[in-house]
Image (cartoon, rainbow, N blue to C red):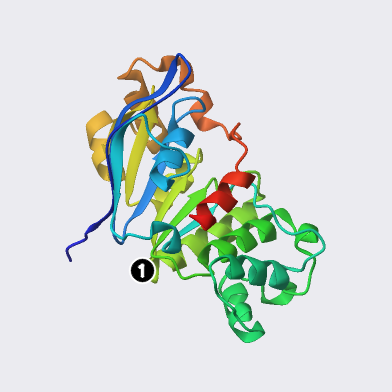
Amino acid sequence: MTHQPLIQAEGLKKAYGPRTVIHHVDLTIQEGEVLAIIGPNGAGKSTTLDLLLGLRKPDAGHVRYWTATPSQHIGLQLQSTPFFPGFTALENLRMFAAFYGMKLKDPELMQHLARCGLADTARTDALRLSGGQQKRLAIAIALVHNPKLLFLDEPTAALDPRARRDIRELIQALAADGTSIVFTSHDMEEVHKLAQRIVLIGDGQVQASGTPEQLLDQYGGDSWRTCIFSSLKSINSINILYKISRRYVYVDHYDNDAAKFIAR
């Protein structure tokens, strides 16, 4: 089966004052794939995602989309979703659907919630849901307009093992249904289980790219984590070997950016 690129980024550069965060990034997101973008904090990964989503403008380079209206066809789950206080999961989903100009009735909203395993908590205040349930609600919100491409930012970070398993199974089900998925993670086991292709960003550039098997062959080692560490050694990033195996939290504040992305 031939896949067409959904997003093509070429020569992306971004600086904040005198500090260049993205030096040169070429990246393609293919239709039908599950792509993991990994890298340590401060390597330029989150800025790259911002540029791909149009949340920030590159200083150089360009991003091409398969559609003239990407915000209507891309779903975005952020680490912190600004749920409406005092609103139930169902009501939050209805509000976010309205941002896309959709007036969904309760049965349709319930189908979206059920898809994400939230049918039994539809009438619960969103802020009273567990961490795993809130992550699933954030994914349901990202899917409410039936996007072709879904971005998931650390979807299992800070969750207990059962909640992580539930999110991973949801991602696998979405991929099986044909949704193209880009996700970030510092859990190498998760990356190996879910990703069909991996992009490693370090020092503001794409340092490695390929399927898990290709990267294992290229960098060797007897485990996936050893492979990633070896690839980092090859780019003189020995100082970040420990960081990449740890969970982390983005320093950017995304609440306003999420609203801006929906409004584009």
**For this rendering, which residue is in front, 258 or 110?**
258
247 relative to 216 in the view: left or right: right
Residue 53 in the image: x percent, y percent?
Answer: 43, 47
Q: Is mark 1 on a helix, strand or loop?
A: loop
Image x and y of residue 186, in percent: 50, 38
Split into 4 quadrants, where in the image is the N terminus?
bottom left
**What's the residue at 72%, 76% (across, down)?**
120
Q: Mark 1 points at which residue?
A: 178
Q: Residue furthest left?
A: 2
Image vertical order of residue 76 relative to residue 250, above or below: below
* Residue 119 percent location from the top left of the image: 67, 76
**Is residue 88 left or right of 100 when viewed as pictured?**
right
Q: In which quarter of the image is residue 221?
A: top left
In the image, residue 228 sits, relative to residue 139, either above or below, namely above
Q: Which of 116 and 57 is in front in this view?
A: 57
Q: Which of 86 and 159 is in front in this view?
A: 86
Task: State the residue in front, 263 or 73.
Answer: 263
Question: Within 10 angstroms of label 1, few (less than 14), some, or many (20 or more) residues?
Answer: some
Judged left or right of residue 111, residue 203 is left
- x%, y% of residue 222? 34, 33
| Residue at 51% in and 66% down | 143
> Exactly how many numbered labels are in the figure?
1
Q: Residue type at mark 1?
A: Gly
